[in-house]
Image (spheres, rainbow, N blue to C red):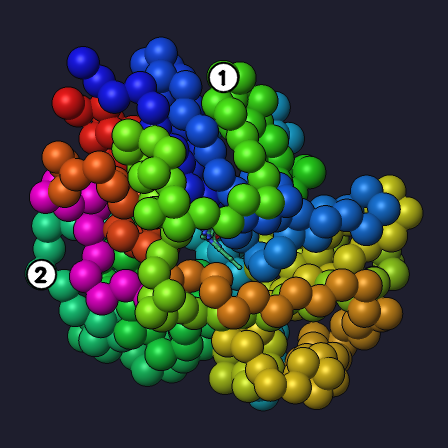
C-alpha cells in the first residue's frame, strides 16, 4: 500500500508539483512553507499594472515540463524575439538575431561586426546541430565548461560581445564556467520555442498551478525540519537545499521610463545586452497603461547597491542614450540559482526506499523545468512502498 501521510517541505515550484502529482493519485499531502506565500523563488510585485518579478526570469515555452503542466494560452505571454540588442562599450549599437525565425534580424545581423562572418556561419551550424539533438543526447555528452566549448568554435570578440552577456545573464555568472550541458539544453530550448513572460509576471505561473491544488493541506509560515516532519508523517519530500549549498546571485533595478523614451518599444520584445560592463548586464522594458518601466539586471550581488544603481544609470545612459527615471523597486537576490557541479537530467534513484525524498532544482540543474520534473519524481518515489 502506498504511504498516504506525506509531508512536503517547501512550497516552491517543486513542492507544488509534488503536491499536484500526489493529489492526482488520490493522496493528499501536507505542504509546509516557511514564508507567508507559495512560489519560492518565483514572485512578482506590481507597480500600477506592471509586473515586477523578483529577479528577471523568463518562461521557455519549449520546456517539456512547462508544456505538461501549464496552459500557456491563458498566461497572455509576451514573447521575446529570438535575438538581442548589443549596446557596446565603444558606443555602437547592434542587433543580432535568428533571421530564419524572424527575417527582420537578417540585415542587422549581416551588418553586425560584434560577430565575424565565420562566427555567423558557425552559429547557424550549431543551431542545426543542437536543435537536432534530443534532451537525453544533450545530457549524455561529456561535460566541460561552456566557455571552453565556445572558445573552440567562436572568436573571442563574439564570445565577449554576445555569449557572455546573453548566457551570463541566464546562468548568473559572467565567466561561463557553467557546464556545456546546461548551455546546450538552454540553447536547444531557445531554438525549439520562445522566451516569454506572462502579462501578470512569473507569479502567474504559480497562481495557475495553485488553482489546481484542492486537496493539499497548505500550512504557511511553518519552518519545519526533516526530523520534525518525520515525527508527524510517514514520508517527507524535502524541496530546499542544505545550508552549505552555493548560489549565484543577482540584483534587479526597476526604473520609471517615459513611454516615448528611445528604444522603449523595441526593448519590450528584444533584450538589450551590455557586454564588458561591471554594472549592468541586460535591460528590457515593461509597458503599462500609463507608464513604462526599465528593468536593469546585474549579475552577482554588490555590497553597495546604491553605488551599483548609480553606475547602472550612467552606463545605460552612456551606451544607449536611455535616461532611467525614478527607481521604483530594487531586488537583491543572493540565492537565485544553485551552483551545481554535476548536472543531471533526472534525480538519483538511490534513495527510493527512504522515508525522506529529496527534490528541487538544486539536485538537477537550475531551472523551472528541473524544479517541475524533480517534484513529479519525488511524488512518484514517495508513493513507492
Ligand atoms: C532571479 C532568478 C532568475 C531565474 N531565472 C530563471 C529563468 O529565466 N528560467 C528558469 O527556468 N528558471 C529561472 N530561475 C530558477 C527558478 O526560479 C527555480 O529553478 C525554481 O523556482 C526553483 O523551484 P524550487 O521549488 O526547486 O525551489 P524554491 O523556489 O527555492 O522553493 C523552496 C521553498 O522552500 C521553502 N523553505 C525553505 N526552508 C524551509 C523550511 N525549513 N520549511 C518549509 N519551507 C521551507 C522556501 O521558502 C521556498 O518557498 C530563476 C531564479 C531566480 C531567483
Residues 115 and 313: in front is 313
Residue 44 in the image: x percent, y percent? Answer: 66, 47
Q: Is mark 1 within 8 Å of ligand 1?
A: no
Q: Are marks 1 and 2 in contact (CB under 8 Å)?
A: no
Earlier-in-chain disc, 1 versus 2: 2
Residue 194 in the image: x percent, y percent? Answer: 47, 42
**What is the span of residues highlighted in magenta in the rendered image?**
339-350
Disc assigned to residue 215: 1
13 relative position to 92: left or right: left
Residue 97 in the image: x percent, y percent? Answer: 47, 56
Residues 149 and 208: in front is 208
User: Looking at the image, which residue sits at the far front?
Assistant: 231
Residues 369 and 241: in front is 241
* Residue behind mark 2: 142
Residue at 72 percent across and 49 percent down: it is 45
314 relative position to 93: left or right: right
Residue at 19 percent across and 61 percent down: it is 342
Amino acid at each position: 500500500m502506498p504511504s498516504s501521510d506525506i509531508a512536503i517541505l517547501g512550497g516552491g515550484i517543486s513542492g507544488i508539483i509534488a503536491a499536484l502529482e500526489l493529489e492526482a493519485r488520490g493522496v493528499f499531502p501536507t505542504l509546509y512553507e516557511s514564508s507567508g506565500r507559495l512560489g519560492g523563488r518565483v514572485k512578482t510585485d506590481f507597480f500600477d499594472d506592471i509586473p515586477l518579478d523578483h529577479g528577471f526570469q523568463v518562461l521557455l515555452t519549449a520546456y517539456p515540463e512547462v508544456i505538461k503542466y501549464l496552459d500557456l494560452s491563458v498566461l497572455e505571454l509576451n514573447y521575446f524575439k529570438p535575438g538581442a540588442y548589443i549596446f557596446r562599450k565603444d558606443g555602437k549599437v547592434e542587433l543580432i538575431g535568428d533571421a530564419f525565425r524572424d527575417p527582420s534580424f537578417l540585415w542587422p545581423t549581416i551588418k553586425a561586426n560584434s560577430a565575424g562572418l565565420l562566427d555567423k556561419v558557425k552559429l547557424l551550424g550549431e543551431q542545426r546541430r543542437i536543435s537536432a539533438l534530443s534532451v537525453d543526447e544533450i545530457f549524455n555528452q561529456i561535460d566541460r565548461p561552456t566557455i571552453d566549448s565556445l572558445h573552440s568554435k567562436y572568436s573571442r570578440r563574439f564570445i565577449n560581445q554576445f555569449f557572455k552577456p546573453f548566457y551570463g545573464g541566464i546562468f548568473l555568472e559572467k565567466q561561463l564556467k557553467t557546464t556545456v550541458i546546461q548551455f546546450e539544453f538552454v540553447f536547444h530550448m531557445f531554438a525549439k520555442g520562445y522566451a516569454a513572460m506572462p502579462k501578470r509576471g512569473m507569479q502567474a505561473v504559480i497562481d495557475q498551478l495553485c488553482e489546481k491544488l484542492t486537496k493539499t493541506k497548505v500550512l504557511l509560515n511553518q519552518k519545519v525540519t526533516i526530523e520534525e516532519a518525520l515525527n508527524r508523517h510517514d514520508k517527507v519530500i524535502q524541496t530546499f537545499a542544505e545550508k552549505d549549498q552555493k548560489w549565484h546571485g543577482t540584483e534587479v533595478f526597476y526604473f520609471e521610463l517615459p513611454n516615448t523614451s528611445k528604444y522603449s518599444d523595441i526593448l519590450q520584445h528584444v533584450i538589450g545586452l551590455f557586454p564588458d560592463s561591471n554594472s549592468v548586464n541586460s535591460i528590457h522594458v515593461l509597458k503599462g497603461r500609463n507608464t513604462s518601466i526599465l528593468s536593469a539586471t546585474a549579475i552577482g550581488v554588490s555590497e553597495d547597491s546604491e553605488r551599483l544603481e548609480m553606475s547602472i544609470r550612467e552606463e545605460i545612459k552612456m551606451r544607449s542614450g536611455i535616461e532611467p527615471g525614478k527607481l521604483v523597486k530594487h531586488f537583491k537576490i543572493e540565492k537565485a540559482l544553485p551552483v551545481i557541479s554535476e548536472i543531471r537530467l533526472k534525480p538519483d534513484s538511490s534513495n527510493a526506499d527512504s522515508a525522506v525524498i529529496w527534490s528541487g532544482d538544486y539536485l538537477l540543474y537550475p531551472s523551472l523545468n528541473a524544479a517541475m520534473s524533480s517534484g513529479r519524481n519525488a511524488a512518484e518515489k514517495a508513493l513507492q512502498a
